[in-house]
Image (cartoon, grey):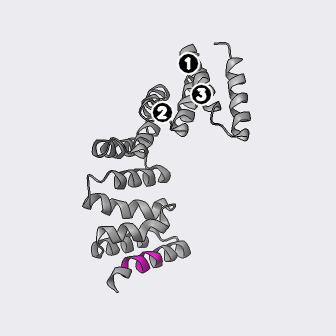
Amino acid sequence: MPELLPYSTLADAVTAYRDTGDFARLLDRIGAIAANAPVDQLIEAAEPFRDIPEVIGPVYEYVVRARPDDARALVTLANAYWLAGRGAETVGELAGRALAADPALRAAWHLWALSESDARARTDRWRQVTDRFPEDELARALLADNAASVAGAESDPEALALAIRTYESLLATAREEQRAVLERAITTLKGWSL
């Protein structure tokens, strides 16, 4: 059963890594597995370890080398890099490549916006995401949060108005516990004098 090879060997490699913490050995084993496994099987074998950036990142480096225009693979690698602290520039570059490959992939847009280090520019990016995906409540919440941050840091009344408007737009679909948080945020922001 050669198709089981990537699954069992990757699981064994992760178990050994968890036991020893030997990252160099983990990388060696992932390299050996990736060299001998078809990409689709490698992706499937890595699925149970998506929450371990030190596993999914190296695996998806191989996947992206094999499929440089695979938007989902680029996003998975970018997300692993983000979680591992690889830096906004690297994540932003991968997110940009993913957007070029598939402009409809919302996850790529999220990473693209998230990776912007300047708060005002990040707010503008979240505005673009919400314009493209108006029903994306997470993007709207992040737009509001970033706008509030800009308003507070720069005493910007336009950013403050954007934050309030965006939080208010989230009230329509908010659950009870979310509603209380949103109402507190709106009340607080309306009390600011800039």
Q: Which residues are magenta?
A: 5-11
The relative height of residue 127 versus residue 17 in the rendered view (above or below) is above
Which residue type does callout 3 highlight?
Ser
Distance CA(mark 1)–CA(mark 3): 23 Å
Q: Name the quadrant containing residue 10.
A: bottom left
Which element type, helix, strand or loop, lies under badge 3?
helix
Q: Name the quadrant containing residue 37.
A: bottom left
Given the current orientation, which residue lies at the most extreme bottom position?
A: 1
**Image check: 177 left or right of 133?**
right
Is 124 magenta? The answer is: no
Q: Quadrant of the C terminus?
A: top right
Please give the name of the residue rendered at 48% of the width and 28% of the height, measured from the top-left corner. Answer: 123
Rendered image: mark on residue 169: 3
Rendered image: mark on residue 134: 2
Distance CA(mark 2)–CA(mark 1): 27 Å
Percent across and percent down for residue 100 are 28, 42
- Asked if one can make out residue 144 in the rendered structure from this viewpoint, the answer is yes
